[in-house]
Amino acid sequence: RTRADEYPPGFTPPENDENAVSLPLEKRLVSKKWQDRKSAYDELVAAADLAPDDVRAAHSESLHKMVADANPFAQERALELLVKLAGAIEKPEEAKALAANVMPVLCEKALSGRPNVKSRASEAALLLVEAGAALSVQAACVGMGTHKVPKVVLAALELLSLVICEFGPRVFELRGLLKPLGALGEGHKDKSVREAALICLVELRARTGEATVSPALKDAKPACVAEYERLCTERSADSGREQPPRLVNGATPIEAVANGSFATVGGGDEEEV
């Protein structure tokens, strides 16, 4: 990848771009010039390769601003930093603290962005789930359900579906998930959002069985139920036995427990969402 690839098509990198490095890191982080901010993120990415815990501790209060950078090229580097920091976390409580800080911003400002931005934001979220912050991710995604911009809601639902496919439903608190998914699947004004919510339910059914998922649509209109059943048939989601390819750190595969809820394992959050 060349330096020119980091800039928009047709944009010539400024010749004095390297001069930004002469500014102190903290000034570059808050600079109005995106090149300065990107230079600062580059420096932090390099530092995170050597001491990720130190970088996270020093910048934990400002990471949410970095990953919401208004310039997509600077934002991409900030998200690369987040990926490195999330991937280095070993303690669930640290993952929860980081997720609480950045996940609402990722949902609103990154997951519905350019492909590279969305890809890195999704990767960071999956690493946070893997480190033990699944319920923090769930809370942020469910919280986007009332957002006024449909593409933001859609992106949050797509992340929920991705987490379900990667880690299975046991990392989530299903009682806090089924009701909002059912409501969005039936009542949201945007067709893509409705379908994405139903797809989440379909993916849950593929791993938990229909009995667990049915309460979400028990009062739904026939048209909504018919669409859900169509998606289930298309997906072949009737077995309820599909196993996820990834596990939360320290977890071992377990089966469903009583009341259709799934145990949180590997140091995941314990509170109900």
Image: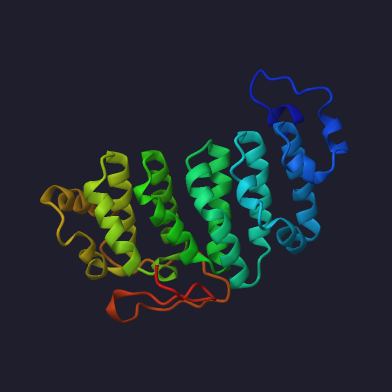
Which quadrant would the N terminus be assigned to in this image?
top right
What residue appears at the point 53 percent right and 66 percent down from the top-left corner?
133
Q: Which of 16 and 158 is in front in this view?
A: 16
* Image location of residue 226, percent across then percent down: 15, 50
Q: Position of residue 211 (x, y in %)?
A: 22, 70
Q: Can residue 234 be seen in this view?
A: no
**Where on the picture, by quarter, is residue 59?**
bottom right
Q: Which of 247 and 219 is in front in this view?
A: 219
Q: Position of residue 268 (x, y in %)?
A: 51, 73
Give the residue drawn at x 75%, y 23%: 13
Whether residue 169 can be seen here: yes
In-image side of 26 versus 88 (left or right): right
Q: In which quarter of the image is the C terminus?
A: bottom left
Q: Quadrant of residue 267?
A: bottom right
* Vertical placement of residue 132 versus 126, above or below: below
99 lies left or right of 264? right
244 displayed left or right of 44: left
- Identify the residue at horizontal 53%, vertical 49% (top origin): 105
Q: Position of residue 159 (x, y in %)?
A: 45, 52
Q: Residue furthest left?
A: 222
